[in-house]
Amino acid sequence: MTARTSLRPQLAFGLVWAVVVAAMVRITQYHWREGTVIIAAALLLAAGLRAVLPPEWTGLLGIRRRAVDVLTYGVFGLLMLAVALTITGGPLTVG
């Protein structure tokens, strides 16, 4: 087994983590709402990748059965998006 084939299953997980890192950068720049929306997008991306990729390509995205993973990632992504878009004011509001 080469290094290339051993890393292939983790590419989807790495892509999701790259989006989360971008979100954390936005949050540390005091754009918490935008960062939260990006994290929600990462969860929805994880749901989409888990739904379409074959099991040998899901890597750490595949924790449970496919349907449970897709449902869990999707619901948490939608809930996080709803919270990020509906909260107003608060101590972290800038400007």
Image: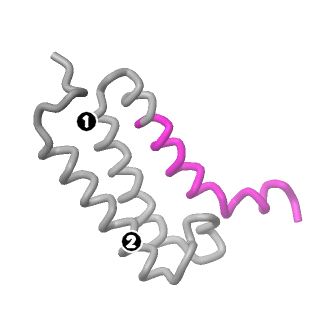
Above or below, 75 against 32 in this view is below
According to the picture, the residue beneath numbered tag 1 turns out to be 33
The label on residue 58 is: none
* Quarter of the rendering occupied by the C terminus: top left
Q: Residue at x 59, y 50 (%)?
A: 14
Residue 47 appears at what percent x and percent y?
A: 41, 66
Q: Picture coordinates of residue 91 (x, y %)?
A: 21, 27
Q: Which residues are magenta?
A: 1-23
Q: Secondary structure at mark 2?
A: helix
- Is residue 30 left or right of 69 when viewed as pictured? left
Three-letter code, disc 2? Thr
User: Magenta: predominant secondary structure element?
Assistant: helix
Residue placed at 65% from the left, 58% from the top? Answer: 10
Instruction: Name the residue located 79 percent from the left edge and 61 percent from the top edge.
Output: 6
Name the amino acid, label 1. Arg
Q: How many C-alpha atoms fall within 10 Å of the one at disc 1: few (<14), some, or many (≥20)?
A: many
- Give the structural element (helix, strand or loop) at label 1: helix
- Mark 2 and mark 1 residues within 8 Å of each other at the beta carbon: no
- The image's colouring method is one colour
Q: Is residue 73 above or below residue 54?
A: above
**Above or below for 25 versus 72:** above
Residue 48 screen position, x and y as percent: 40, 65
Going from N to C along the chain, the mark reached first, 2 or 1, is: 1
Residue placed under numbered mark 2 in the picture: 72
Residue in view at x 57 percent, y 72 percent: 62
Q: Where's residue 55, x and y in %?
A: 60, 77
Q: Quadrant of residue 4?
A: bottom right
CA–CA distance between discs 2 and 1?
22 Å
